[in-house]
Image (cartoon, rainbow, N blue to C red):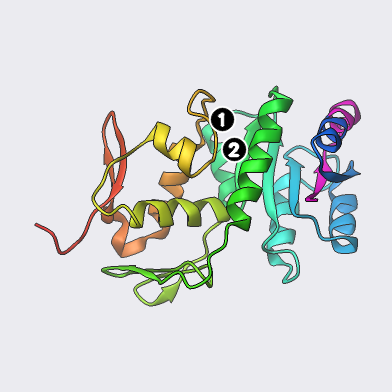
Amino acid sequence: MAHVLIVDDERDLAELIDFNLRGAGFSTRLAFTGEAALAAAREQSPDVVLLDLMLPDLSGIEVCRHLRANSQLRDVLIVMLTAKSEEGDRIRGFEVGADDYVVKPFSVRELVLRLKAILRRSAAPKDSTPPLALGPLRLDVTAHRFYVDGQETSLTALEFRLMEHLMARLGRVQTREQLLEEVWGLSSALETRTIDTHVMRLRDKLGSARALLETVRGVGYRIVDPAAG
């Protein structure tokens, strides 16, 4: 049973999410402030934190930073909940380590599906999976580490999964629909605007290899071999 920490100062919404997650088989805990969320996470490490961006004390961004800085909590999955839909807010969340981003108002059913998908991905067995290497890039699936020019680069769980998916399909264009279904674990009928933001943030982290992650306009994305052509 996955444990979810729900952090939102809108009590009615938090309790609605809590009711639905418990009905879907999750264990849950509620926190209505940033400080309460950090205390709850230290007391019982969650599998996922549903984190509102706007809290009465610490912002969701600050809570996310604190979680990622804690050696015991840095690998917790973080899904941000917010009423803000601007791209800049999504980017800020991903910059500090959020794994996904859900804009209010949202479908509770879709939220449950997102949580199940992200947990399913994180729990997938990776034993004896050989590292993927391409030019200056090296992705160690088993150890969950990523390197650019020999230097380790921190990726969020979704960024890592996205990079693994693209590197394993070298040179093959992956459409948004394919990425939604195979990386996000969502039906392509459920539209999300986070793919482009994730790709942009991932490309920034590739440094000297950023050109290897290509956008195929009107189609999708691919990783190309620097030795080709």
Q: Are marks 2 and 1 in contact (CB under 8 Å)?
A: yes
Is residue 46 shown above or below 138?
above
**Mark 1 Cα shell of 10 Å, populated few (<14), some (14-19), many (≥20):** few
Residue plotted at (54% across, 25% down): 190
In the rendered image, residue 130, in percent from the top left (x then y), is placed at 41, 72
| Residue at image coords 90%, 62% | 43
**On the rendered image, what quadrant is the C terminus found in?**
bottom left
Q: Is residue 140 visible?
A: yes
Q: Amino acid at mark 2?
A: Asp
Residue 63 horizontal/vertical position (percent): 76, 53
Residue ID for mark 1: 86
Q: Secondary structure at mark 2?
A: helix
Residue 157 magenta-drawn?
no
Task: Please determine whether, in this image, residue 96 is positioned above or below residue 175.
Answer: below
**Residue 135, located in which quarter of the rendered image?**
bottom left
Magenta span covers which residues? 1-16
219 and 109: which is toward the camera: 109
Check disc 2 and report the residue beneath it.
89
Q: Residue visible at 23% across and 54% down?
A: 224
Q: Which residue is nearer to you in this view: 159 or 188?
A: 188
Give the image quarter of residue 81: top right
Identify the mark at residue 171; answer none if there is no mark.
none
Kindly give the residue lying farthest to the left in the view shown.
229
Secondary structure type for disc 1 = loop
In this rendering, would 182 be left or right of 120? Answer: left
Q: Is 125 left, or right, of 24 in this rendering? A: left
Q: Position of residue 160 (x, y in %)?
A: 49, 57
Lateral position of residue 138 relative to residue 144, left or right: left
* Of 49 and 153, the residue lying toward us: 49
Amino acid on which disc 1 is placed: Glu
